[in-house]
Amino acid sequence: YSLDQGANLISFPSDGTYSFEDAFPEVLDGVVTSVLAEGESAVYEDGAWYGSLTEFSGFKGYWFISSDEVDFQFDLDGRDVLARTISKTKQYLPGYEYNQSTMQSFYYIKDIPMAELGDWVVAYNDGVVVGTREWLGYMTDVPVMGYDGDDYSLGYMGNQECPEFKLYKSSTGQLIDLYSEGQMQCFVSNSTPVLNRLIDTQDELANSVKLKSAYPNPFNPTTNIQFEVQSVSANVELNILDVQGRLVNRLINDEFNYGTHDVVFNADLLSSGIYFVQLISDQNINYTKIVLLK
């Protein structure tokens, strides 16, 4: 096979069924970023494959999403083949059925704090169910169906529309609204966006950046200021104020990705005393006190 950069539709060259792990050529790891089938997907993230696509079945079609041009072949000699009659039974959440569309994407979710195994994630477009998936923990992929021009997909996702997610609690039947901590990529067919965390309240989203203590503190003349971005990305402004609240130094004002970040503050030109680190993110302002001793 010869893959071009982007989406490539290929058929699996066997009449048997092979596990994804056994059949997928290792040479494609990291080059092919995701593989999509009807209602199932696999994505390569942090050196491993995740998703609901666990088997290749004979002569079915698969979308290989490649980051570069590459040639490869399937090496199936000596691989264990499952019986042709064996197939996975697709599971659906009763009352939340939807139609499989030729336009689809898969949203991978790393964490939903209130979700338990056996709960379901339901995707909506303006009140219309466009996908469901049982919650299986880290990197659960939720299919999201798009409108492909046929009547069966009326009301499904349009290009660059953003889905809404809800958590169905199997133990109670409760349906809980979910919100993404970071900016959510809107619908694009054959895409596999990754969401770090979905939570049940928008109030917590505003606190997605946390200011940590500076160290050393007291200091002379430099100290390290650390903050943590808990969403996909956030704009962070970091200032140094004197005891009267006047701006002494603006250290940063930029967009930062998920993770912990360090900023070194050099107070060589300042006099000894008490200062405050001010962190501004979204609509929140946080402070921590630092002491300069010379």
Image: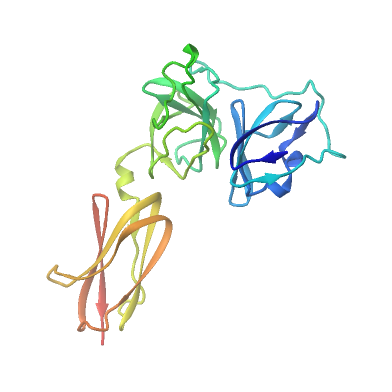
Judged left or right of residue 9, residue 170 is: left
Q: Give the farthest residue toward the left.
A: 244
User: Is residue 269 depicted above or below 65 in this figure?
Assistant: below
Judged left or right of residue 33, residue 200 is: left
When asked about the image quadrant of residue 53, the answer is top right
Q: Residue at x 62, y 41 (%)?
A: 4
Quadrant showing the N terminus: top right
Residue 24, image x, y percentages: 72, 41
Q: Residue at x 20, y 84 (%)?
A: 271
User: Is residue 212 depicted above or below 112 in this figure?
Assistant: below
Q: Give the farthest residue toward the right.
A: 78
Judged left or right of residue 122, residue 219 is: left
User: Is residue 184 depicted above or below 280 in this figure?
Assistant: above
Q: Residue at x 34, y 70 (%)?
A: 214
Colouring rule applied to residues: rainbow
Quadrant showing the C terminus: bottom left
Q: Residue at x 55, y 22 (%)?
A: 102
When asked about the image quadrant of residue 226, the answer is bottom left
The count of marks equals 0
Residue 210, image x, y percentages: 34, 57
Residue 61, image x, y percentages: 67, 27
Judging depth in this view, the residue of 256 and 276 nearest the camera is 256
Judged left or right of residue 269, residue 134 is: right
